[in-house]
Amino acid sequence: MQVNWENRENTMYIYLNGELDHHAAHVVLKQIGEAIDADLPMRCLVNFSGVAFMDSSGIAVILGINRRVTAYGGKLNVTNIPKQASRVLHAAGIDKLVPMVIEG
């Protein structure tokens, strides 16, 4: 899993590429958490368009990012979610907690 991010106008844009499984989730959450703590963005946009596969570990990543961002008064949005990942997130009810935009 590759994670890239950039900050523009107090918004952190996060791009995920690869497979988000239990092997990658811990590392991804640590990297993103450190970046959020350093920059304190008021908004985070996590782009899932590059996620080829996601298991339930992706739920922990989204919830962890959401907890980090809201602790500073910010908001999280998850965008470009592929259908496979969308099914996992909807089954867990994450779409009721975090605004999401499904791909296609």
Image (cartoon, helix red, strand yellow):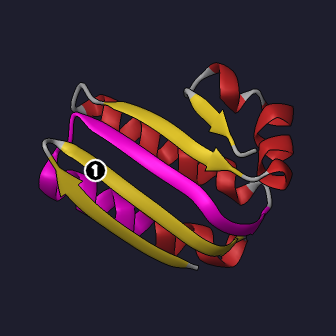
Q: Could you say which quadrant of the image residue 32 lies in?
A: bottom left
Q: Is residue 29 magenta?
A: no
Residue 41: % across, % down = 20, 42
Q: Residue at x 14, y 53 (%)?
A: 39
Residue 95: % across, % down = 68, 27
Say what secondary structure mark 1 lies in. Answer: strand
- What span is in magenta? 30-54
Q: Could you say which quadrant of the image residue 91 lies in?
A: top right
Q: Is residue 46 magenta?
A: yes
Q: Could you say which quadrant of the image residue 53 lies in?
A: bottom right
Amino acid type, callout 1: Met
Question: In front here: 96 or 30?
Answer: 96
Q: Residue at x 75, y 53 (%)?
A: 82
Give left or right: position of 17 versus 33.
right
Residue 72: % across, % down = 21, 32
- Image quadrant for the C terminus? top right
Give left or right: position of 14 versus 19.
left
Give left or right: position of 5 versus 61.
left
Task: Read off the residue under disc 1.
Answer: 12
- Image quadrant for the N terminus? bottom right
- When the figure is inspected, residue 7 is found, relative to residue 23, above or below; the finding is above
Report crowding for label 1: few under 14, some 14 to 19, many 20 or more residues within 10 A (C-alpha): many
Give left or right: position of 17 versus 40.
right
Q: Residue at x 14, y 58 (%)?
A: 38
- When the figure is inspected, residue 103 is found, relative to residue 33, above or below; the finding is above
- When the figure is inspected, residue 4 is found, relative to residue 96, above or below; the finding is below
Q: Residue furthest top?
A: 96
